Image (cartoon, grey):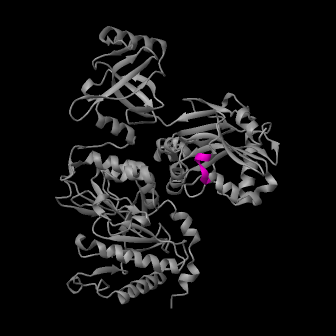
Amino acid sequence: MEEGKEYITMWKPMLPKLSDEIPDKSGWYFEVKYDGFRAMLHWTTSKVQLISRNGNDLSANFPEIINFCKEKMDEVSAYLPLQLDGEIVLLNNPYQGNFPLLQQRGRLKQQRKIKQYAKERPVTFACFDLLMKSGNGLNRNTFLERKEQLYQLFETMKWPLYVTPAYPIGIVQQYEDFSELWEKVTTNYGEGVVAKRGANKYETGKRVNHWLKIKNWRNITGVITGFDSNNDYFQVSVFNDEDKVVPIGSFKHGFTEEQYDTLSAFVKEHGKQNKDGIITVPPGITVQIHCLDAYDGELREPLFDQFRFDLEVEENTEHKVQIDLSMLPEDVELTNTDKPLWPTPNLTKMDHVMYLRRIAPYMLPFLQEKRLTVIRYPHGIQDESFFQKHRADYSPSFVDIDIEGDETFIVCNNIKSLCWFGNQAAIEFHIPFQRINRPFPDEIVFDLDPPSRKEFSLAVKAVNVIKDMCNYLEIIPFVKTSGNKGLQLHIPIPEESLTYDETRQFTEAIATTLVTQHPELFTIERLKKNRGNRLYVDYIQHAEGKTIIAPYSPRATEEGTVATPLFWEEVSEQLDPTDYNLKTVPSRINLKGCPFQMMEIARKQQNIQKLKSLLT
């Protein structure tokens, strides 16, 4: 028999039971539940395989994991054969897997396309258990013992002790505090949490009650419009903008016997059956459904929750589904949600708050532990605005603060605060270059500001020239649109590695070099009247107390544009900043991922000494 073949037919994973109850006794540990493909990584001296829970070989579809393991073969040889239990995930962020895109990857057959996808949007093996090490089975060890050996292995190999999109393999971290992990999972739209009892052994092929999965359900409502008597699935629909009934999916699980009988009786009494066994029924009864997502006419893992007799049938709309899927925090009271903030693209306050909620997993990390300055437009961008950086008396308790002398500054550390600011019509979010109580900057930023959008190509030229300088200095830069008419280049640096005086010397040196090389295109002239049609390189703006627009912040522009992180290959003459707005950016991240997701790793890798060698 071919080596490894026996594991394809024999491996059966231990499975968790679905639960609504959170264990409150000691001895339980909590991990992220990822929405991916459950798999075993079977690794011998001659072969690396990814085996699904059904015994299928998934190796050919995910070469980035297989190639990584082959590259590490010599280093890990002392621990082979290895069997790692985990989940193949395509990460949107460290807590959320993108299951629809992963499904697409799983269906690919052409190696050319597989390699292309593996390069553009690589998957990660999120490892949560160790079943074999050095050929010794560990099933009889407790979960804590297996997890400890897993950590020791990864520490020895210098692999990440956490799951990150930046590395092909990582450990699913365990938490002792459910609430701490649940906040991270809900903020980041994760699938849920798995609770594991530390003292239990691994029971192959069984669904056990010492592994419990607690789902992060989205609750949506719709009307029953059909029933398939061939498979007992009910069809649920909503009304679109034209008041037409459109299906959003079907479901059959989650009922009590009484609830099922009630709904079945309604369908049979009011519906019409065709020759295929499909019963259609006019909209008349509203149901609430647990699910993980709703897209392309399908519901992800739907479960019946309850009847909603308090809702009128017409209240079940596509727009309401999108609001429900956004999972807005219940503690934030929304007011005047129909108020237009961007009149031209017809974006309301509700659109704004929903955008902030969706973008929170990617925007919040840049706001945390930094004093925040917002620009509020109470009556929309075409009316008056004002800056706010101090805490108002009416601010709720979940809005964090930083006190210095007689001043109380606002800080946005959590999802509730972000949505509350959105409800206050805070459109622009500006942040300083250092964290609270830290006198040193944690990044260097170049603000490249052309005279108008007509000269946007100057910003593209400037940012690429600065990127070449960074490459020479072995510095890793990141780029984003300003959300208005320019581009901004970010260089993350380790905290306390450079003072503001040193970063000022560096930014001035780069700006001066840029102007010296292309005096007809760029200038450091502060007075607008003396700039002509040249791009202004603002190096003075990088200083203590100054601020920059936060990544993913909306802007008060006519088009509702967003300060959007970019991939470097996107920075070309064809780049149009108006393409990146409140309507397009969330789906862009879902499709492509976040270009700034590598920033923390880059921060640790920066060649600060080479940079310092340029300073006087």
Q: Report whether 33 appears left or right of 300.
A: right
Image quadrant assignment for residue 458: bottom left
Q: Position of residue 279 (x, y in %)?
A: 35, 14
Q: Is residue 17 above or below residue 596?
A: above
Q: Main secondary structure of the magenta part?
A: helix
Residue 545 relative to residue 615: left or right: left
Q: Position of residue 14 (x, y in %)?
A: 68, 33
Tell me which residue sits at (42%, 50%) in the image: 591
Residue 121 horizontal/vertical position (percent): 50, 54
Q: Is residue 19 above or below residue 559?
A: above
Is residue 242 shown in magenta? no
Tell me the quarter of the picture where residue 481 sits: bottom left
Residue 332 found in image quarter: top left
Q: Residue at x 33, y 46 (%)?
A: 354
- Taking depth in this image into account, of 121 and 330 the one nearest to the observer is 121
Q: Is residue 79 visible?
A: yes
Q: Position of residue 258 (x, y in %)?
A: 45, 11
Quarter of the rendering occupied by the N terminus: top right
Q: Is residue 546 left or right of residue 186?
A: left
The stretch of residues the image draws in magenta is: 60-64
Give the answer, above or below, for where 155 lies relative to 614. Answer: above
Q: Is residue 63 magenta?
A: yes
